[in-house]
Image (tube, grey):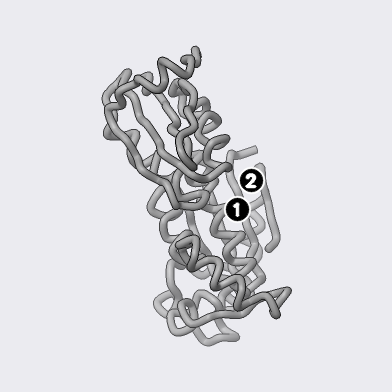
Amino acid sequence: MAEKLSMTVMTGSIDRLTGMAILAGGAAGMDVEVEIFLQLWGVYAFKKDVITENMHLSEFKEKGEQLVKRMKELNLPMWFDILKEARESGKVSIYACSTASSIWDVNKEDLEMVDDIIGAGEWVLKSKDAAITLFI
Amino acid sequence: MTELNLEELRNLKADKVVDARGMACPGPLLAAKRAIVEVPAKGILEVLSSDAGTRRDIPLWAKKMSHEYLGDVEDAGYWRIFVKTVK
């Protein structure tokens, strides 16, 4: 098993993306390689024209305002800045699903922080030897 | 790995101090990782953190990176965490 964290990201909601980014950061800090595969809403959330504007939550939407307020009070960075720092600190690779990229009609240049567009088969081969595999 | 007592830790003079107070996990851990490259061999890194997770992360990180965790001292609302580089 490779000392690797593999995350398949279906979500485009910023609460879950924050959790994902923090895990990427924790792994990078411990020199654990990270590989991320964005599917559907994940690809959508990484679009350059969506990424900083996105305020979608997956649950407890009525707590959204309180959450944002609290994050500001604590000076917490947004998920994409946490992920950016993780990429600067360790080996964090991000791939976008080719089908989702077709759906949203995007190529690599339309997405932030995405290294390549790949298919499901290649992703399964990349993940199969990871010690930690997550679906977010 | 020998941990120092509180008195020794309080008087320790670090080669580099990383002030990560007010940063949330994983910020302080990543700041420590960036900073340790600037610490000479057998030198001391001091990490200031108000994050409880970081207080547990740093000794684990030190062990994984083959550095020496020396201990931590609690100050007003934060911890001073000490790591000694081996190489």
Near-viewer residue (A7 or A118): A7
The Cα–Cα distance between marks 2 and 1, rounded to whole angstroms, is 8 Å
Quarter occupied by residue A136:
bottom right
Q: Which residue is mark 1?
A: A126
What amino acid type is highlighted by mark number 1? Lys
Q: Residue furthest front?
A: B76
* Image coords of residue B1 (percent x, y): 50, 14
* Image coords of residue B2 (percent x, y): 49, 12
Along the horizontal axis of the image, is A127 left or right of B45?
A: right
Secondary structure category for the residue under label 1: helix
Q: Which residue is mark 2?
A: A130
Secondary structure category for the residue under label 2: strand
Chain letter of mark 1 equals A
Near-viewer residue (A132 or A28): A28
Q: Is residue A55 above or below residue B51?
A: below
Q: Residue furthest top?
A: B2
Examine the rendering and report whether any part of residue A78 can be seen.
yes
- Please report the residue visible at 44 percent of the width from the left and 52 percent of the height from the top: B22
* Image coords of residue A102 (percent x, y): 56, 83
Q: Are marks 2 and 1 in contact (CB under 8 Å)?
A: yes
Along the horizontal axis of the image, is A63 left or right of B66?
A: right
Picture quarter with the C terminus of chain B: top left
The numbered mark at residue B30 is none
